[in-house]
Amino acid sequence: MLSIGEFARASGLTAKALRLYDELELLRPAEVDPSNGYRYYSAEQVEQGRLVARLRSAGVPLPRIAAIIGADTPEAAAEEVLSYWRDVEASRASAREVITSLVGLLRGQDTTMSHSAPAPLDISLADLIARLYEELPDADDLARVGAARRQARALSDLGDQLVEHYVSEAKLGGATWSEISDALDATPPGSPKRRSRNPLEGFTDLSRHSIVLAQESAREHRHELIGTEHLLLGLLSEPRGLAHELLTTHTCSEEEIRAAVEGAMPPGGEQALPGHIAFGPDSKEAIEQALRAASDLGHDWVGTEHLLLGLARAENGLAARALRDLGLTVDSLHEVVATEVARRRAANDE
């Protein structure tokens, strides 16, 4: 029998990861000494451990790894791996189509100025009022006020999703955040000047990139909405951000954090969603809380550190629970962020 340290060296996994995989019932030890809790693994498990290590290095999420190593036959396990890769390729296909079309556009004649503005939506205020009366013919005025407010929120969310969709496509096509911001502010000739609301205004390039990575995480895990757990994984996938440094310095390794988050995720759908994936309610709240956190700290930017604070403040989200399990509370994170930003500012002033 191999001790956990010996098995870790033989399989390429860390001892901490093995303890976590045991708790998640992903890779259980062959024996556990009841007197001291020491874990022991058999020599036959080394290949399975190496398989898990290789799958993790390939970016395969833990739920998919569980399905692969739990398959009844080697052929079934191979099919699970192929299924995962098909999902990865499907998620890349939409990005490839956007890039291909943009390359073709850039190589052709520049027709930017000749594009006419989209036709206005075939809906008017009168249509919305009439529809609400039809849906609530016997309601009183106050009930209609509440219904109108809910409808306005739905329209606003739909508009935000429309903007987010094309922001993602533009970013995948190589546009810079500055160019995207200019496009968000642009108005057609002859139209009244009206500033479009940019939901990520003030966010740094690194925090925006983390959000793009969060969408890819949601797609990879076959989830229909971007949750706070995906935003947390996005921060972990951006090693240049302060949030990544704070997480790995004050808790444990990136792999262990990622494994803990993925282990708590709900199961995904049958296949990855193509195209844009919208934010869920908790992740929207986290982004709003990130803006407030930056304001509370007196910062005029929203970095990955503020997004991490926003995740902790969105207390009902999966990410907040994961952070609490890692020993990071809202108050402790606030203090750590304030201290680290102040330290970096002082270092830059020297």
Image (spheres, rainbow, N blue to C red):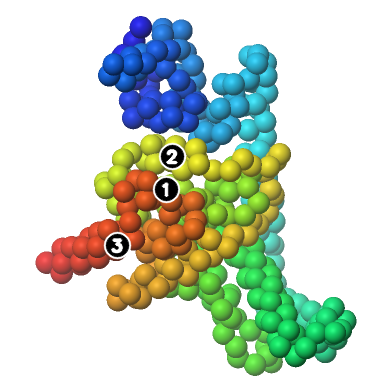
Residue drawn at 66 percent across, 38 percent down: 87
Residue at numbered disc 1:
322
Cβ–Cβ under 8 Å for marks 1 and 3: no
Q: Position of residue 164 (x, y in %)?
A: 61, 65
Residue drawn at 18 percent across, 63 percent down: 343
Cβ–Cβ under 8 Å for marks 2 and 1: yes
Amino acid bearing label 3: Asp
In the figure, residue 146 lies in which quadrant? bottom right
Measured in 3D between alpha carbons, the distance from the residue under mark 2 to the one under mark 3, in whole angstroms, is 22 Å
- Crowding at dot 1, Cα within 10 Å, few <14 / some 14-19 / many 20+, comes out as some
Sequence-wise first label, 1 or 3 = 1
Measured in 3D between alpha carbons, the distance from the residue under mark 2 to the one under mark 1, in whole angstroms, is 7 Å
Report the disc number at residue 331: 3
Helix, strand or loop status at disc 1: helix
Q: Is residue 195 left or right of residue 120?
A: left
Q: Is residue 342 left or right of residue 117?
A: left
Residue at numbered disc 2:
260
Measured in 3D between alpha carbons, the distance from the residue under mark 1 to the one under mark 3, in whole angstroms, is 15 Å
